[in-house]
Amino acid sequence: SQQGEEDPQALSIQEGENATMNCSYKTSINNLQWYRQNSGRGLVHLILIRSNEREKHSGRLRVTLDTSKKSSSLLITASRAADTASYFCATESGYSTLTFGKGTMLLVSP
Amino acid sequence: DAGITQSPRHKVTETGTPVTLRCHQTENHRYMYWYRQDPGHGLRLIHYSYGVKDTDKGEVSDGYSVSRSKTEDFLLTLESATSSQTSVYFCAISSSGQGNTIYFGEGSWLTVV
């Protein structure tokens, strides 16, 4: 069963706009990760945030984690057409393996 | 790109036939995983390995078996393929099982007719 659930399922924006995706989960976690998948390709790791961290940045990506609300958000600033992809959150709990959500499909139009 | 090679990349097979998918890595990572990806379900873990000959079941292991006789190779076998096993299968690797990035292969598209 899915631990993380992304919201929205699909997001359509214009180039230059910011894109925000959210992930909610059910049980306590060790860390939460975000991955990106271009159509027909494998997933690529974007960023990992540990349970004792509240915010991390990587280039145009900003991830926040609120463990009290069991939620995370991924912000992509100044989106580009090349950011068009599906984005997945994945949670790690206890000694278990990563559990992935169903993903958010992001479409960035030129 | 992480050194992960999946084969075959595309396969069509008939119901009831056995199928083996191979994952080969050149990174010497200890952990290897097999996921399946289906519309509406995201990625689900089938089996994983934490060392040579050490494997464990994931969320959707029924109908699948795995073997790992060498660090670099992780095989996924569908003993008797069914239409419900039509999916995209991804192999992934990581250096440890906790708190580490997972690197994915490019996927194997399997159609069972």
Image (cartoon, rainbow, N blue to C red):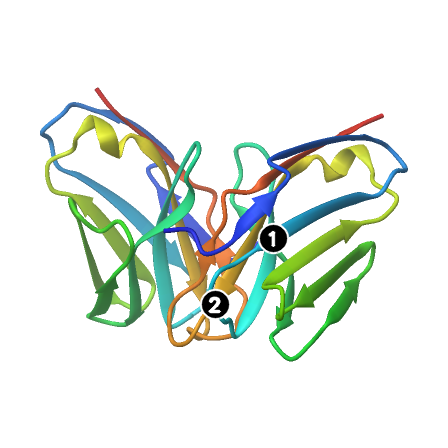
Residue A73, horizontal then vertical, whole percent: 70, 55
The answer to which image quadrant residue B82 occupies is top left
Q: Residue at x 43, y 31 (%)?
A: B39
How many numbered tags mark residues here?
2
Which sits in the foreground, A82 or B58? B58
Which quarter shows the C terminus of chain B?
Answer: top left
Of all residues, the one furthest to the front in this rendering is: A69
Q: Residues within 10 Å of mark 1 (few under 14, many from 20)?
A: many
Q: Which is more toward the observer, A43 or A14?
A: A14
Q: Amino acid at mark 1?
A: Cys
Q: What is the chain identity of the residue bearing mark 1?
A: A
Q: Which mark is residue A92?
A: 2
**For this view, does A20 lie left or right of residue A105?**
right
**Residue B3 visible in the displayed image:** no
Q: Name the spot of residue A61 as percent of width and height, x first.
A: 78, 56
Q: Amino acid at mark 2?
A: Glu
Please determine whether, in this image, residue A77 is positioned above or below residue A109.
below
Give the secondary structure at mark 2.
strand
At 29% from the left and 66% from the top, the residue drawn is B49
Which residue lies under the disc numbered 1? A23
The relative height of residue B80 versus residue B65 in the rendered view (above or below) is: above
Which residue is painted at 48% across and 61% down in the image? A26
- Is there any visible trace of residue A37 in the rendered image? yes
